[in-house]
Image: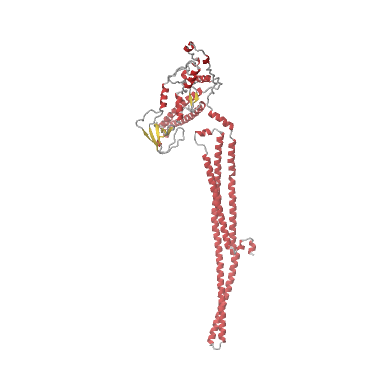
Amino acid sequence: MVEEKMGACWSYTRDQFENLEKHTQWGIDFVERYTKFVKERSEIELNYAKQIRNLSKKYQPKKSSREEEESKYTWCRAFLASLNELNDYAGQHELIAENMTSQIIAELTRYIQDLKAERKTHFHDGRKAQQHIENSWKQLELCKRNFERACKEADRAQQYFEKMDADINVTKADVEKARQQAQLRHHMASDSKNEYSSYLQKFNQEQTEHYHTLIPNIFQKLQEMEERRIERVGESMKTFAEVDRQILPIVGKCLDGITKAAEGIESKTDSAQVVESYKSGFEPPGDVEFEDYGQAMKRTVSENSLTKPDKPDKSVKGKSKLFFFKKNKTPKQPKEALSHRFNDLMTSKPKMHCLRSLRRGLSLKLGVNPEDCSHLPPEQRRKKLQAKIDDISKDIQKEMDQRDALTKMKDVYVKNPQMGDPSSVDPRLAEIAQHIDKLQTELQKFEGWLAEVEGRMPVRSEPTNRQSSVYDRQSNTPPANNNCAQDRESPDGSYTEEQSSEVQTKVQTDTEFDDFDDAEEDLLPTIGTCKALYPFEGNNEGTLTLAEGEVLFVIEEDKGDGWTRVRRNEEEEGYIPTSYVEVFLDTNTKGLYMWG
């Protein structure tokens, strides 16, 4: 009746105690295995997120001047936005790992411990009931054997009494003794029978209670425990999927952000930005005039032609002071025969650069950019100078705001001496005033350079020929800069100022130019050596990379700014931190000429 009421209950398996024990243990092992699976999935998510973050960090633009250039273009900004979105995308995978750890792994780990404890309790009760029924059975068997033995002994005693009673040779006393013994055995057998019957009834009751009450209750609890375990596994699997589903909206937004960044790329804007970035500001050269060297062949040689030179061109009168010439260069001679003119062209020396242009080219070769940005084309130089002026103006405004604040504080101290000493603010005010003066000096210097560039910028017009354009640019040059002509690009890639050979009409001797020419032949002699104490990465322009223990030649001492100028070989020169090396100056060369 109990089994029919319980339906599909584990009570049907009351004789499969050991099998149920194995099955429940396998269920717990499955939960542990599933927990391990989720844990490994969480580790995979963490590693994936870490690799995505490292990838995003690897391709982030470095903090340098190149970053400013890249930020101008929409495709560079789109890639940077994609990297940022990818970084957020990695964060969502970290969130998956975190939620799986807290919502699944930690919960299942605690549940497994509770499940093991509950299972242990139930099977302990089951083993106890099983042990009790087995002991009862053994006791019943013992009572049964005792009853059987007592019956046999009573039967033998009865047979012995009958035998003695039938024997006429046996005395009456022996017969009586045998009769008493038979009665005793019958009494003992009767007691054993009663004991066996009583214990048998008790065992049957216990057995009925064991198989119909105790074991079914224990198995019912085990069944409920197993059903809860199965439901918990199902809930964990749902949570496993829900954790992934929760991040899908954010992941979708990250992908939408990448798509939006890609759609924001404007090829026309980037193309125009290239023009804006690299626009030099130079006026295109005019047409080259045809020089008819055949006129010399048609000319008749006469005394007049030999004695009277051609008149100088009046168009260049007074303009020869704008150019530098090498010493002892003869003035322009009258037109000669074609063969003489050809010889002059073949043996003519290359055009000379002015002193500032040569210094600038030297600075570029040594990796040191001039402060006035003269190594750049006019348009780019103007932009750099304007940006520098804006920065200095901001610094001046910041210092002035700080000065005003301190002045107000001083006024408060004057009116309320208990709040502070007014004289304590004076040192700081003096320091700020000196800093403002220094910044204003810098500002005036850069504004002067900017005015120079803007004054020398060519006017947009259609040049008729090369010669006329040269004269136009010379006439637009401010008087303060009449020692050099319009900037042009030198063969080494730097922008230098040179003159046209077509307007060289006067010999000019420049002592400074000659001194520089002599210094160029013996440039920066070695004044000692130095040994690198620490490695140094020369990432900035004009610096050298050091390896620990490396020995270099010193060509210029530290002038108080913390940098020493060195040479590795005939081509590699640059600056290194003085604190990173040990310098050994030659006593015979210390204090020699150095280019400042």
Q: Nearer the viewer, residue 571 or 3?
A: 571
Q: Give the vertical position of 165 relative to 225 (above or below).
A: below
Residue 484 seen: no
Query: Which picture quadrant has residue 326?
Result: top left
The image shows residue 43, relative to residue 569, as above or below, that is below
- Relative to 72, 578 lies left or right: left
Residue 515 drawn at (x, y percent): 41, 24
- Image quadrant of residue 111? bottom right
514 vs 574, nearest the viewer: 514
**Residue depicted at 58% across the width and 39% down the height:** 258
Q: State whether residue 537 appears in this view.
A: yes
Q: Residue furthest left?
A: 587
User: Where residue 576 sits: x, y (%)?
Assistant: 42, 34
297 and 591: which is toward the camera: 297
Where does residue 190 sit, x and y in percent of width and height?
57, 77
Residue 334, percent from left and from top: 48, 15
In this rendering, is residue 84 above or below 218?
above
Please name the residue shown 53% across and 86% down the image: 173
- Give the quadrant of the C terminus: top left
Along the line of sight, which residue is nearer the eye, 341 or 455? 341
Colour scheme: secondary structure
**Residue at the image position 54 percent from the left and 60 percent from the top:** 120
